[in-house]
Image (cartoon, helix red, strand yellow):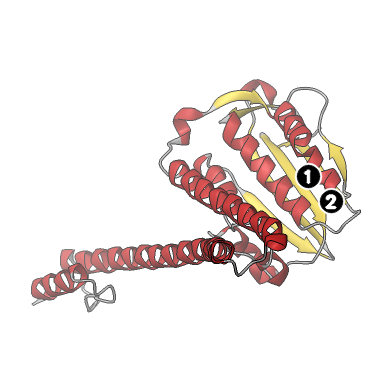
Amino acid sequence: KPINALVSAARRFADGNFDARVYDSGRDDEMGELTEAFNAMADSLQRTEQQRREFIANVSHELKTPMTTIAGYADGILDGVISPEEERQYLTIISDESRRLSRLVRRMLDVSQLQSIDMIKEKRPFDLSESMRRVLVSMEKKITDRGLDVEVDIPEDAVIVLGDNDLLTQVVYNLLENAAKFAEPDSALFLGLERKGGKAVVTVKNRGATIDEEELPRLFERFHKSDRSRSEDKDGVGLGLYIVRTILDQHREKITATSRDGVTTFSFTVQLADDNRGGKS
């Protein structure tokens, strides 16, 4: 009977019934272990299937909005519903939405590629402080356009870490871009780097709306936007912080997020190279 129950549950699972489980009678033998293993496998596959469905639903939603806008305004221009005087305004919207659609597809491809990389084989020593300075230079226009200042606390000497330079630079860029996007106008961002306990610790802060504590872990989920103001952000596609976590997971590193009294802080670690394990800078 236990074998028959397993066979029946496996067949139901194969037919798409992801709720199928085998009753655990508490047997303390190989059959009991097999039952426990089957149910654990079923739980894992059910979570994966749920994530797959949510991902498809989110992708469909994110793609539908710009595509509907582009098609609607293009048809309006072609049908003459939109006057020639208004054409430039709506062509600008079509251009903006096309670029947003391109960013979404590019970010999705980034995620797909990242998930297929074995980062252990890609770790190389590089100067993280120099990479962070390059990010600041590349972000200068976006930061100044929002009337923001930047407080920088990066050691003048090299901070050599082990990892993929391009991907970890992308982490810093995404975090700083996110901080600039949601900072109060005329406020100051903070970008810092220190050595601590065999790790380099990168910190990015901004002043803006406080994020609810229960929302903080969800910031790193695919397509998640934590509040109404973020949901209305047309430049974001809800993948920037997910990419950050994916890259750091590949590096076996950690990231934390806190938000108190209007100050939101992201901090992540990177392994220091063996010859660079000094004290706190």
Q: Secondary structure at mark 2?
A: loop
Disc 1 residue type (three-letter): Lys
Q: Position of residue 99 (x, y in %)?
A: 60, 50
Indicate which disc residue 117 carries: none
Q: Position of residue 48 (x, y in %)?
A: 37, 62
Query: Callout 2: 10 Å neighbours few (<14), some, many (20+)?
Result: some
Compared with residue 58, is residue 269 higher up or lower down, i.e. above or below?
Answer: above
Residue 241 visible to the viewer: no
Q: How far is mark 2 from mark 1, CA to CA?
A: 7 Å
Question: Could you say which is closer to the camera, residue 185 or residue 210?
Answer: 185
Compared with residue 135, is residue 157 higher up or lower down, i.e. above or below?
Answer: above
Instruction: Please state, as top left, top right, bottom left or bottom right, where the N terminus lies in the image.
Output: bottom left
Q: How many marks?
A: 2
| Residue located at (81% from left, 33% from top) | 154
Disc 2 residue type (three-letter): Arg
Residue annotated with mark 1: 142
Q: Position of residue 256 (x, y in %)?
A: 66, 53
Q: Position of residue 38 (x, y in %)?
A: 24, 66
Q: Give the farthest residue toward the top.
A: 275
Instruction: Please state, as top left, top right, bottom left or bottom right, where the C terminus lies in the image.
Output: top right
Residue annotated with mark 2: 146
Q: Using the rendered view, name the quadrant where residue 182 is placed.
A: bottom right
Residue 147 visible to the viewer: yes
Question: Could you say which is closer to the camera, residue 206 or residue 192?
Answer: 206
Compared with residue 73, is residue 198 higher up or lower down, i.e. above or below?
Answer: above
| Residue located at (47% from left, 42% from top) | 114
| Residue located at (79% from left, 51% from top) | 205
Question: Could you say which is closer to the camera, residue 203 or residue 114?
Answer: 114
Q: Secondary structure at mark 1?
A: helix
Q: Using the rendered view, name the quadrant where residue 126 is placed.
A: top right
Disc 2 to disc 1: CB gap under 8 Å: yes
